[in-house]
Image (cartoon, rainbow, N blue to C red):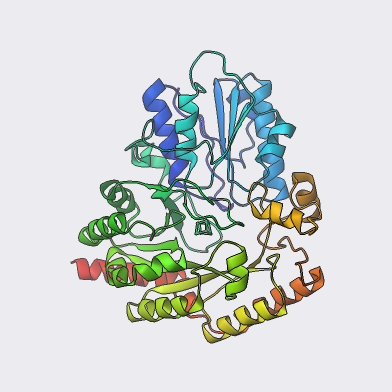
Amino acid sequence: MEPSCSQPNKSATQSFSSTPWTAQVAIRRKYECDYAEIFVNTPDSYAEVFSQYTHFVLFGSVFYNVKLVSLQILLLKVAKMVGCRTLLVGNQQGFEQDIQFKSGVDVVVSAIDSDPIVAIDLLEENGFFSDSDYQGPKQYSKKDIRSKKHFCNGISFLKSRKDICRFDYWSSPYNFKQRIVSVGTGCPFGCTFCPSQNSIWSSKSADQIVNEVAFWKGTAIDLLTAEFFLNRKWLEKTLDALASAYIPIWMRVQGRIDSIHRNLDLLPLCKKAGIEMIYVGLESASDRVMETCNKSNNQTWRVEEIIQVARQNNIGINLNLMVGFPEDDEDSLNETYEFIKRYPYASTASFFRPIPGTSIIQEMKNSGLPFEGNIDLDGYLKHYSNRWTDGVHLPTKYLSKDRVVYWKQKFDELMKERSIPFLHFLTHEDISHRIKQRRKRNG
Ligand code: SF4
C-alpha cells in the first residue's frame, strides 16, 4: 500500500529530521512492507488508518507541551486498540516511562534526536518487526543502544519518498527553513545534567553526509550530533569532503568547549565546508558549578579564544546557557552574567531542568533538593505547558526559586537589550545572502 498520509497543515510548524525517514527506509528495505505517515494535525480517523497496519512507530517530538504529549498518548492508545504492535521512540526528555504506563505502548526507547536510527537497529535485533510474538512491554534506554552497525548502516533518508522532503517541513523554533540532518549520535562525556551522558559516539561516513547535505542545498540545516568536534580524524575527513563539494548551504553544528578549542585550527575549514554557526555548550561561566556537574575543562578563557577565531572566520557563535543548577549561587550567576555582558553571544538562557534518568537527579535527592513535581509527567504537565517558554524552575542549594526566576529574567533582559552578533545570522535574508555568496564563489 502506498502511503495513506494526510498532507501537513501548512499553517502549523512542521519539522524535518532525517532520522525517522532513514529508519523507515531501513524497515521497508528489510521487510518489504507498506507504511503510512501521519501528521498530527490531520482530521482523519486514526483508527481507520492504523487498522491497515501491523506496527505503529511513533517518533516523539522534542518540543513537549501538554497538547503534544496528550496526543502522543492518544495515538499510541488507538494503535494498540486496533491491534498494532506499538513503539514510541522518545526524545530522552524523561517521560517515556510515564507515557508507556498511560498508553500501554508495547515498547519504549528513550533516544535523543540523532538516535532513532540506532533505536530501530536495537528493535530489529530483538525481533520487534518480525511476525513472531514479541515479549512486551519493554523499555530501552541509551545503555541498551550500542551501535548502528547493522540494520541501518549506510541507509539514507534520500532513499525515502522524494516528494515529502523538499519544502513542507520546517524546524522550529526558527523563522526560516531549517532541517535537521543527523550526522551521528552519542557522547562519551558524563555531564550529570545531560540525557546524552556516557553514551556511545558514532557517526555517518563523510560521503553520506555530503550527499544528504547536498539534497538541502539552498537552505539551512542543523548538522546534528551531540559532539561534532569530538573525533578529529572524522572531523577533518567530513569537513574536507563538504568543503570540496562546496554546497551552497547554511549549516550549524554544536560542540563542547574543550573539543572545539582543541580543533580551533579547523575553523577555517568549517567555514569552507558551509558551517556558519557553532552552538557552544557554555551552560555556566562558573568553573565551580561546571565541575560539580562533571563538566570541567569548560573554562571561559577557552570560550574567549573560540569567539576570537570564529570572528576571524566570520562564523557565528551561540553560547548555550542554563540558569539554576543545584550549585548555582549569587556569585556563579553573576559571573555568567558578567561574561555574557562582555561577550554577548547568547540568545536565550534556559532554566535548568532535572531530566529523569540523568545522574544529577540522585545528587539532588542526596542534597534534599525538592523536585516539585517536575520529574513525573503529571506534575510537569500540570505546572508547565511548554518547556521552552515557561521553563521548569526550582530552588538551588543556595538560592530560592524566586531568586532563580529573578536571575533568569535578568539574563532575558540583558539579551533583549544587547545587540547580539549572533542574531545577524538569523533572518531569512541573511541566510539567503550567505547561500548566494557561496553559490557565486562556486561559479
Ligand atoms: S559534552 Fe555535551 S552532549 Fe556530552 S554529555 Fe556533556 S553536555 Fe551532554
The extreme front residue here reads 366
Instruction: Out of 407 and 86, give the one closest to the viewer.
Output: 407
* Looking at the image, residue 227 lies above or below residue 283: above
Question: How many marks are shown on the rendered structure?
Answer: 0
The answer to whether residue 163 is left or right of residue 70 is left
Q: Residue furthest left?
A: 443
Residue 69 vs 76, above or below: the answer is: below
Of 64 and 94, which appears nearest the observer? 94
Residue 413 pos. (x, y %): 67, 80
> Which quarter shows the N terminus?
top left
Q: Is residue 266 above or below residue 383?
A: below
Residue 200 falls in which quadrant of the image? top left
Q: Is residue 334 among the parts visible in the rendering? A: yes
- The correct choice, above or below, for 194 with respect to 323 in the image is above
Left or right, 325 with respect to 269, comes to right
Residue 290 x, y percent position in the rendering: 58, 68
Residue at 48% over, 43% down: 115
| Residue 35 seen in the current view | no
* Residue at horizontal 62 percent and vertical 65 percent from the top: 292
Is residue 20 found left or right of 80 in the rendered image? left
Outermost top residue: 132
Q: Nearer the viewer, residue 267 or 397?
A: 397
Quadrant into which the C terminus falls? bottom left
Residue 216 lies, in percent from the top left, at 35, 53
Residue plotted at (44% across, 76% down): 302
* Residue toward you, 139 or 439: 139
Q: Please provide percent x and percent y for residue 136.
A: 62, 22
